[in-house]
Amino acid sequence: MQRLPDIALTALAPLIWGSTYIVTVTYLPGLDPLLVSLLRALPAGLLLLAFTRQLPTGGWWPRIFLLGALNFSFFWWMLFIAAYRLPGGVAATVGAVQPLIVVFLARLVVGIAIKPVAILAAVVGALGVGLLILKPSAALDATGIVAGLMGALSMAFGTVLTRRWQPPVPLLTFTAWQLTAGGLLLMPALFVNLEALAGFTADNLIGVVYLGLIGASLTYIVWFRGIARLNPNVVAQLGFLSPVTAVALGWLFRNETLSLLQWLGIALIFGSIVVGQRRATRAR
């Protein structure tokens, strides 16, 4: 049976990820999305790998590189393209389709039955995200929209396959493998951004350290733990908490106010999560 502590711990990951946008635009403005993704993944992965001192064996090599690409390389590349080209509200709203994608992928890959309540929870949560942070004046960029959708698809596949492929190693090791593999796949970005690296500032370093150690190493350990213990649909729905954090940070540090529609969006988000996790618990 699913436990509230497992859900609460897993929810820490998307709550922290909600700070990604503000950190990116504040400390890493104008950098190549591929370079930012590389600097976020590889140093953190190598650090964890040095600590765990264990490498994949046999058939785990191709699996780890595929998971590293889906969960990190391609997903973060698309995420940062969307973050740079779209307002935060638009980027988050586009990415909110991911739980709905997971509902269908979980049926195909893991064999979890599609429940109308799961679809409803995903749709209501996405609607809540739209009400929370999407403004009428938000500018749309075709490249940013496509990148956001591709990123959501990549993370959905990564979530479901991570549940299907559970390795015989601790979560710390599993996270180290994926971060390192994802970083290695992004290495070409290093050679086309030497000039940007030469002009790296203290603010850039702060942003990279935060996104790598807190926004990657720590959060993905608890995220993968949640995927191993919980229904993938429940885990994906927790991703709706990221926009809540983003809005809360704006309220705390930028003196932003919340409208009635935004409060309604928050209510829909939390309602969708509660309904989705309770239905998944009964199904299990």
Image (spheres, rainbow, N blue to C red):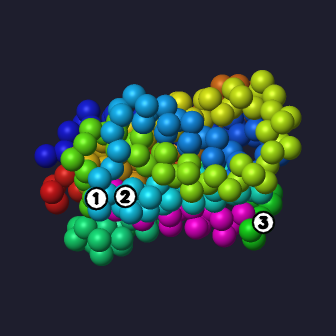
Residue located beneath label 1 in the image: 58
- Packing grade of label 1 (10 A; few <14, some 14-19, many >=20) is few
Q: Is residue 30 visible?
A: yes
Tag 3: residue type? Asp
Amino acid under label 1?
Gly
User: Residue 113: x percent and y percent?
Assistant: 23, 71
Q: Residue at x 38, y 38 (%)?
A: 221
Relative to residue 270, is residue 32 drawn left or right?
A: right
The residue indicated by pointer 2 is 61
Residue placed at 75% from the left, 70% from the top? 142
Quarter-wise, where is residue 43 in the image? top right
Residue 57: x %, y % from top left: 29, 53
SS at mark 3? loop
Q: Which residues are magenta?
A: 144-163
Camera-side mark, 1 or 3 = 1
Q: Amino acid at mark 2?
A: Trp
Q: Are marks 2 and 1 in contact (CB under 8 Å)?
A: yes
**Was residue 159 drawn as part of the magenta stretch in this picture?**
yes
Q: Nearer the viewer, residue 215 or 95?
A: 215
Q: Nearer the viewer, residue 153 or 265?
A: 153
Q: CA distance from mark 2 to mark 3?
A: 37 Å
Disc 3 marks which residue? 141
